[in-house]
Amino acid sequence: GRLASPAEAKGDYGYTENHPLTIVCDWDFRPFEFLDSDGQPSGYNVEVLDLILSRLNIPHKFVMQEWHEATMMFEHHDADLIHALSYLYNQRPFVATQKYINYYNLRTARHMNTPPLRKVSNLLKSDTILVKRADYAAWQVQERCDSSFGIKYCSPKEGLMAVRNKRYNYFIWGEEPIKRKIQEFHFDSLVLDRIDIPAGELRIIGYDKDIVDIIDDEYTRLEQVGDLQPIY
C-alpha cells in the first residue's frame, strides 16, 4: 500500500486494518523468521517488529514466503518491509535501518569424511557448491565463481540431505539457520566450517524513511530498557 507523507500521518502512517503495513518474511530462516509448528509467523524479527509496530499502533501483517519469492514480492512493491542484506538494497528507493542489524555469518556444511573447504577459491571445476536461492551465500559465491566451479540452488533441507548422502560435498548457508536445520533433522554426520566470506548485515529494508527511522528509534529504546530478548 501507499505510505502516507509525514504531514498526513496521524500515528498510524496511513495504514489501516484493511490496508496494513506488510512485512514479507522467509518461512524457513530460523531463528530470525519462520513458520512455527502451527503454521504461524514466528522468530526474532517477527517478535521484535510485532512489538515495535504494536507499540506504535501501526496495523501490520506478516506474509511468509519462500525466500526468493519474498524478495521479488518486496521489489515489486507488494510488501512494505523486508529483513534482508543491506548491501543488496543500499540505494534509493530503498532505505535501511541503521541500528537494527543482525550480523549474518556463513558456514559450510560437509560430511565428516569430506575434507573441509576453507576458501571458495579452493573449489575445482569439477566441484558444485549448493546454496539457497537469493541467500547471502548465493550472492557471494556467484560473485566469486568466474565459472571455475558449479553452483546449484536448493532448499536447505535438500542441500543438507545431499551433503549427508555425499552426492555433493558442500552446502553454504547462515551459521544459526544451518545449526537449527541440522538439529531439526538430526543430521549427526554433518560438520560445519568457517568459510572466507565476511559476515553480511541483515537490516530492516523499506521504501519509506519515516517508517524505517521510527523502527530504528523504537529498537534503540527497547535495547536501552532491556526489553529485547537475546536472539539465540
Image (cartoon, grey):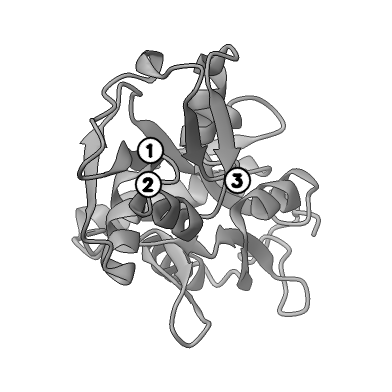
| Neighbour tally class for label 3: few under 14, some 14-19, many 20 plus, Cα within 10 Å | some
Q: Which residue is mark 1?
A: 169
- Label 3 sits on a secondary structure element that is helix
User: Residue 206 lies in what quarter of the image?
Assistant: top right
Residue for point 52% across, 43% down: 84
Give the side of residue 171 with respect to residue 184, left or right: right
- Label 1 sits on a secondary structure element that is loop
- Expressed as whole percent of the image width and height from the top left, the position of residue 19 reads 77, 71
Residue 20 visible in the shown view: yes
> Which quarter of the image is occupied by the C terminus?
bottom left
N-term mark: 3 or 1: 1
Residue for point 51% across, 17% down: 125
Give the side of residue 95 with respect to residue 112, left or right: right
Question: Hey, what amino acid is under mark 1?
Answer: Asn
Asked if labels 1 and 2 touch by Cβ distance under 8 angstroms, the answer is yes
> Distance of mark 2 from mark 1, alpha carbons?
6 Å
User: Residue 221 lies in what quarter of the image?
Assistant: bottom left
- Expressed as whole percent of the image width and height from the top left, the position of residue 32 reads 39, 58
- Expressed as whole percent of the image width and height from the top left, the position of residue 1 reads 80, 59
Nearest to the observer: residue 127 or residue 183: 127
Q: Which residue is mark 2?
A: 166
Asked if labels 1 and 3 touch by Cβ distance under 8 angstroms, the answer is no
> Distance of mark 3 from mark 2, alpha carbons?
49 Å
- Label 2 sits on a secondary structure element that is loop
